[in-house]
Image: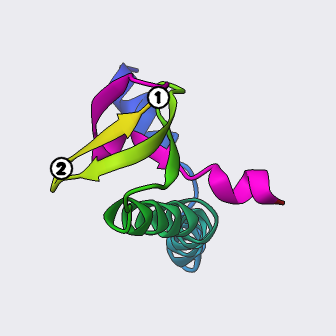
Amino acid sequence: MNILTVLLEATPAQAPAGSDWTIWGMLILIFVVMWLFMIRPQRKQQKELQKFREGLQKGEKIVTIGGIYGTVVEVDEKTLLIRVDDNVKLRVDKNSVVKDFSAASQQ
């Protein structure tokens, strides 16, 4: 006997007809769960952060991604001028601003 005849004779029994649909159903269920618990909340958080960045105004206290705390002095289309210390001002990209810490400090 050669290997080909052994492989052809050893074919497994046919799987039940519903097993293909079960696998597809499980894959779809996994995708839906991932979307509900991972993708959807992340998109919501990104939209809130974008809305915050677009609504920045002069005088607001902010924190940059690098951990620099400052107060907004000037708002341009893509950049912010922030005051860090008495006479120290930095120009940063709006995308580097992560949160407003003035609301947290008031509570």
Image position, residue 61 (x, y; %): 53, 48
Mark 2: amino acid = Lys
Relative vertical location of residue 87 with respect to residue 31 in this rendering, above or below: above
Is residue 5 at least partly visible in the picture? Answer: yes
Task: Report the quarter where the C terminus lies.
Answer: bottom right
Mark 1: amino acid = Val
Which residue is painted at 50% across and 27% down in the image? 68
Image position, residue 54 (x, y; %): 32, 65
Give yes or no for residue 86 being in the magenta stretch. yes
Q: Is residue 90 left or right of residue 22?
A: left
Is residue 11 at least partly visible in the picture? Answer: no
User: Which portion, as a residue range, is magenta?
Assistant: 85-106
Which label sits on residue 84?
Answer: 1
Res 26 → quadrant: bottom right
Relative vertical location of residue 74 with respect to residue 55 in this rendering, above or below: above
For disc 2, the marked residue is 78
